[in-house]
Each structure stands twice: as C-alpha cells, then as structure tokens.
Image (tube, rainbow, N blue to C red):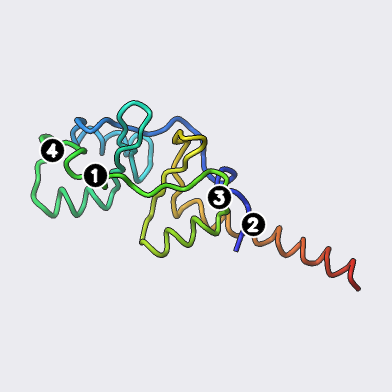
C-alpha cells in the first residue's frame, strides 16, 4: 500500500465549514456552491462533526426533517475519526474501507487542514503504487 503521505493528496483550499447552529439548508447550499460532498462542523478551530451528503439523505430527507429548520449540529456525525496529515495514504484507504467513510478530516499539528475523500484516493494510491514499483525496480537492478 502507498506510503505517500495524505497531505500530498488532499486539496488545501479553504475549509468548507459551518458551525453547529447552521441550518441544513445553508450547509447544503454551501456544499453545492463548493461542489463538495461534506462540510466540517467546527467550533472555533475544533472539528466537532462532519455533515455529508449521506447525512443529508438519511438523517434529514429520509427522516422527513425540514432542512430550513434543522441545524447541522443535530444531524451531523459527531466527533468524526480523523487522520494525521503525515499518515500514509494506505492508512486512509484502510480506515475508509473498514468504517465505510467517504470523507475523513485531515489533521496537522492539532489543526484541520482539509478532508480526504474517496475521490482523492484512486489517484493518490495509483501514484504511490507507481513510486513503490519504481523503487523496487531500482533496488532489483542494484541487486542483480
């Protein structure tokens, strides 16, 4: 599995974020504007939750809640698991597969610097595997 760090794969644009009192409608509008599938729910610099398109579908629409009245803090995934920015991509792939995550907040020195999503992983994993294959070929050439 790729040893390339997660920080090299994520996009470090501004964080798409909301506070827990933001309405689901406003959060969904922001997700649509940014063309992303999740929004970090933060209090100051602390990640207290994540609200995803799956949460919107299952916890709001399917549950019959009003997006204009419901707060993201009521329907978010609370205290989401995170991954360190220097962790290998392979660790992110394993965690996302094991726990069926599509989005995983990325932490660097205690601060959230972005979110890795399943959209980032195929490219990052392929690049990492290509690097590992090249490295193994170089080692094999030195041995033979």
Q: Residue at x 31, y 43 (%)?
A: 50
Mark 3 touches mark 4? (CB < 8 Å): no
- Residue 76: mark in rendering: 1
How many neighbours does mark 1 have within 10 angstroms: few (below 14), some (14-19), or many (20 or more)? Answer: many
Give the mark, 3 or 4, whose residue is nearer the N terminus.
4
Q: Secondary structure at mark 4?
A: loop
Report the Cα–Cα distance between label 1 and label 3: 25 Å
Report the Cα–Cα distance between label 1 and label 2: 32 Å
Q: Secondary structure at mark 3?
A: loop
Q: Residue at x 30, y 44 (%)?
A: 79
Residue picked out by circle 4: 70
Mark 3 touches mark 2? (CB < 8 Å): no
Report the Cα–Cα distance between label 3 and label 4: 35 Å
Residue picked out by circle 3: 87
Quadrant in the rendering for residue 20: top left
Residue picked out by circle 2: 128
Give the mark, 1 or 4, whose residue is nearer the N terminus.
4
């Amino acid at each position: 599995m790729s040893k390339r760090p997660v920080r090299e794969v994520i996009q470090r644009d501004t964080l798409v974020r909301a506070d827990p009192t933001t309405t689901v409608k406003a959060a969904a509008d922001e997700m649509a504007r940014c063309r992303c599938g999740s929004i970090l729910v933060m209090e100051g610099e602390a990640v207290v939750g994540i609200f995803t398109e799956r949460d919107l579908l299952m916890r709001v629409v399917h549950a019959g809640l009003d997006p204009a009245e419901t707060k993201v803090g009521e329907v978010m995934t609370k205290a989401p698991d995170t991954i360190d920015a220097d962790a290998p991509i392979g660790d992110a792939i394993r965690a996302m597969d094991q726990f069926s995550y599509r989005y995983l907040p990325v932490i660097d020195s205690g601060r959230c610097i972005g979110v890795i999503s399943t959209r980032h992983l195929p490219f990052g994993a392929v690049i990492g595997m290509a690097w590992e294959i090249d490295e193994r070929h170089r080692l094999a050439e030195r041995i033979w």
